[in-house]
């Protein structure tokens, strides 16, 4: 090899020539950055100046990987809702525009995971796998993209499936005082979706950490996390996270709905969501209205719940069923937030504290509960056996209040009360014990036809279990009709009642010899 100075100079000359050519051909890609300054920081919000081009609900970035949403766009400054801990944020810190809105990761990788509204994992199982990201705020599907609600969403609770049915694509409000079993109904509904090809999204908004941990533990224990996504904000989280939580959870659910899947989403609860929005609005100096809520409190919930629907077949036929939960105070269902939600949703399930104290669980007040859609999606067999049940139960509750005064009752009234007591006994149901469609229909038919009228009240639970166990003896072709739109024929009813009579016979008292053979 020739190492003379002349040869080395030649190598260097060629190298520098190549560098010069590369430098001349390089075109820098300049990206403008719009940077502002924090002027003040409050609990959950920050005031920022120097971002003249920022848009409404645009995501802005603070030091320490802290993000916020531009909420108030004023001439001199903007009000930003913070999505994280603001303790290390100070006046004078730099703020940078991101040019995008708040989004959340979506995809099949989220199933079985516990995340916060930003998509950060909370279950200690590593990073979340996702296919893409969707904005948390998305427009609701237009009317022409929707289809009628025709398929029932079975909750496994007799009182709801029979008397207040819910359809896939419906929005059914669950409301009641504190500690009356609202979340228990929602969790039971999620548990009943096993093997039903329904994806579930449970959104806990501003709940106590212990309550959230208990709900997740129940879902894991019963195997429901295999088809469930949990989105969590706790009570000590910033109000901005609580505000975006239901929107982020809905975007996750919409990803599955747009893929043609049936999805159930639970908002637990929207009372905390409304309070977090009120807190943010007051801190941002927005004008307060009734009960200090801002004037657009109705709009934040309507634009959320309008995203729940049943898409038509051209868009895959997926559905998103919403079960929003709201907390009332002193049984006041005519308060501001409850009435807003009642007017937005397609019905409500009201839980009575009085029934809860009496041990009637689930404590559903049938008289104050209604489903405006689900009856159209209910199986034909349900409609034939439960059609008169609600009326009979309403008559019983009215007559029961008169009977408490010690009034002498005629024979017809006494029979109505006895029949109503057996209806109430069959509507009682422990938690985490869903009942299948076939078992519900057979028990309800036995009630309607008086097959349980001779069973003592204290033995109703055992008689009901005996009937449910005897469902296996019913012919398969009849069982198939339970989950279809085919009505039960007279022969079907006769065959079912024969099985019921054999099942309840051990619980019926022996008739005196002179009455044997009489109806």
Image (spheres, rainbow, N blue to C red):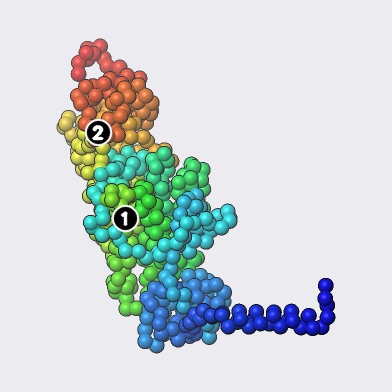
* Residue under pointer 2: 381
- Viewer-nearest residue: 433 or 261: 261
Q: Secondary structure at mark 1?
A: loop
Residue 381 placed where, x, y %? 25, 33
Tell me which corner region of the image, top left, top right, bottom left or bottom right, holds residue 342: bottom left
Image height check: is 123 above or below 395?
below
Q: How many marks?
A: 2
Image height check: is 115 above or below 90?
above
Label number found at residue 60 = none
- Viewer-nearest residue: 250 or 348: 250
Furthest residue toward bottom: 76
Q: Is residue 512 left or right of residue 218?
A: left
Residue 483 placed where, x, y %? 30, 34
- Viewer-nearest residue: 399 or 268: 268
Residue 482 placed where, x, y %? 28, 32
* Residue under pointer 1: 308
Tell me if residue 203 can be seen: yes
Residue 478 placed where, x, y %? 28, 26
Image height check: is 183 above or below 474?
below
Residue at horizontal 52 percent and vertical 61 percent from the top: 120
Tell me if residue 358 can be seen: no
Give the mark nearer the N terminus: 2 vs 1.
Answer: 1
Image height check: is 46 above or below 449?
below
């Amino acid at each position: 090899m020739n190492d003379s100075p002349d040869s080395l100079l030649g190598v260097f000359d060629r190298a520098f020539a190549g560098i010069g050519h590369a430098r001349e051909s390089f075109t820098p890609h300049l990206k403008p950055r719009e940077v502002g300054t924090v002027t003040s920081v409050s609990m959950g919000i920050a005031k920022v100046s120097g971002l003249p081009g920022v848009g409404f609900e645009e995501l802005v970035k603070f030091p320490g990987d802290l993000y916020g949403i531009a909420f108030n766009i004023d001439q001199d400054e903007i009000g930003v809702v913070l999505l994280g801990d603001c303790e290390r944020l100070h006046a004078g810190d730099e703020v940078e525009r991101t040019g995008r809105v708040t989004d959340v990761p979506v995809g099949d990788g989220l199933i079985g995971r516990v995340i916060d509204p930003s998509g950060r994992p909370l279950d200690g199982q590593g990073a979340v796998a996702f296919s893409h990201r969707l904005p948390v705020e998305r427009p609701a599907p237009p009317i022409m993209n929707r289809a009628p609600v025709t398929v029932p969403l079975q909750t496994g609770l007799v009182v709801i499936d029979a008397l207040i049915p819910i359809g896939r694509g419906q929005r059914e409000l669950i409301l009641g005082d504190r500690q009356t079993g609202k979340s228990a109904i929602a969790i039971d509904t999620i548990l009943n979706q096993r093997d039903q090809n329904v994806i579930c999204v449970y959104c806990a908004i501003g709940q106590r950490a212990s309550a959230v941990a208990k709900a997740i533990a129940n879902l894991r224990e019963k195997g429901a996390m295999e088809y469930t996504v949990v989105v969590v904000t706790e009570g000590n989280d910033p109000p901005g996270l609580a505000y975006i939580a239901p929107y982020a959870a809905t975007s996750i659910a919409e990803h599955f709905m747009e893929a043609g899947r049936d999805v159930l989403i639970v908002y637990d609860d929207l009372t905390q969501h409304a309070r977090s929005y009120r807190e943010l609005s007051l801190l941002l100096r927005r004008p307060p209205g009734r009960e200090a809520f801002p004037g657009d409190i109705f709009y934040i919930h309507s634009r959320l719940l309008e995203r729940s629907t049943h898409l038509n077949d051209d868009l895959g036929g997926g559905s998103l069923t919403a079960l929003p939960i709201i907390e009332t105070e002193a049984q006041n269902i005519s308060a501001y937030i409850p009435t807003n939600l009642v007017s937005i949703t397609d019905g409500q399930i009201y839980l009575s504290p009085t029934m809860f104290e009496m041990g009637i669980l689930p404590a559903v007040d049938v008289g104050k509960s209604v489903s405006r859609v689900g009856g159209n999606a209910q199986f034909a067999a349900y409609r034939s056996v439960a059609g008169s049940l609600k009326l009979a139960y309403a008559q019983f509750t009215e007559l029961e209040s008169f009977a408490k005064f010690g009034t002498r009752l005629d024979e017809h009234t006494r029979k109505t009360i006895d029949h109503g007591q057996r209806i109430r006994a069959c509507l009682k149901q422990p938690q985490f014990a869903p009942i299948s469609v076939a078992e519900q229909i057979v028990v309800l038919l036995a009630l309607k036809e008086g097959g349980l009228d001779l069973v003592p009240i204290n033995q109703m639970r055992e008689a009901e279990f005996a009937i449910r166990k005897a469902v296996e003896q019913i012919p398969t072709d009849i069982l198939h009709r339970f989950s279809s739109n085919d009505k039960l024929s007279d022969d079907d009813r006769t065959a079912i009642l024969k099985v019921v009579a054999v099942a309840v016979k051990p619980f019926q008292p022996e008739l005196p010899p002179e009455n044997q053979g009489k109806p």
